[in-house]
Amino acid sequence: MKRKTKAEVILEFLRGNSGLATAAQLSALDISGGHIDALLKSGIIVKAARGVYMLPDSFEDEFVNLQARLRKGVFFCETALYLHGLTDRTPDVFRMAFPLSYNTSKIDANVLPTRMKIDLYERGKTMVTSPSGHDVVVYDIEKTLCDILRPVNHVGVNEISHAFNLYARSRARKLNKLSEYAVKLHVEARLRSYLEVLV
């Protein structure tokens, strides 16, 4: 049986991964930087961002690019609302949460970072599909709704109301989980003022 070339291995991985690969993923496949450079020079792959590579005909996904560069980042607040379909506003700035110990001083200009204590940072992480079909890490809907209620996050009243109205029509809503998050995030009083749209 003929052994696959490094180029064939990379292309096979990219085709099975929606046309995208990170440097870490390629390294796990025993692909060296030299092999990547050769494919870049030949135009077989292109660099989407630092440490992110794609097929030339793949649609660039900024959500995936950001998570590849900021691996501890979790999409948060208005950006999470967008990914969950609870707002129609496309993010012009991406909000991401990071552990409290994470150095956010060199984060991309189009990212608004929030640092959290580790228990809040870990709580409610889930995966959703980005608009171009890639899995990204985001907080679940109930945590996101409680996050937008926190005054420190500066989310507008109209956007909060719109999100809660859409959530109220969802068959997948989990009011017990929403209440648990509200207690943990100290937004019980604010949540009560929005719960009337849920009953």
Image (cartoon, rainbow, N blue to C red):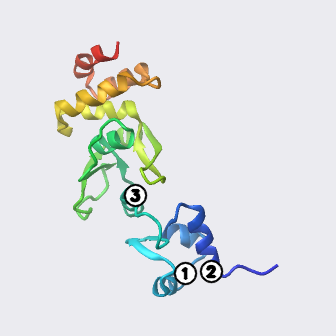
Residue 115 position within the rendered picture, expressed as x and y whole percent measured from the top left = 28, 48
Q: Which residue is drawn at 40% across and 64% down?
A: 60
Q: Do the residues labelled 2 and 1 touch (CB within 8 Å)?
A: yes
Give, as a three-letter code, the residue at label 2. Lys
Q: Are marks 1 and 3 in contact (CB under 8 Å)?
A: no
Give, as a three-letter code, the residue at label 3. Gln
Mark 2 lies on a secondary structure that is: helix
Mark 3 lies on a secondary structure that is: helix
What residue is shown with label 1? Answer: 32
Q: Nearer the viewer, residue 126 or 105?
A: 126
Q: Residue at x 46, y 23 (%)?
A: 171
Measure the alpha-carbon separation of dots 2 and 1.
9 Å
Crowd tier of the residue under label 1, counting other residues whose Cα lies within 10 Å: few below 14, some 14–19, many 20 or above = few
Q: Nearer the viewer, residue 145 or 184?
A: 145
In the drawing, what numbered circle is on residue 6? Answer: 2
Residue 41 position within the rendered picture, expressed as x and y whole percent measured from the top left = 46, 87
Q: Residue at x 44, y 54 (%)?
A: 132
In the drawing, what numbered circle is on residue 67? Answer: 3
In the drawing, what numbered circle is on residue 102? Answer: none
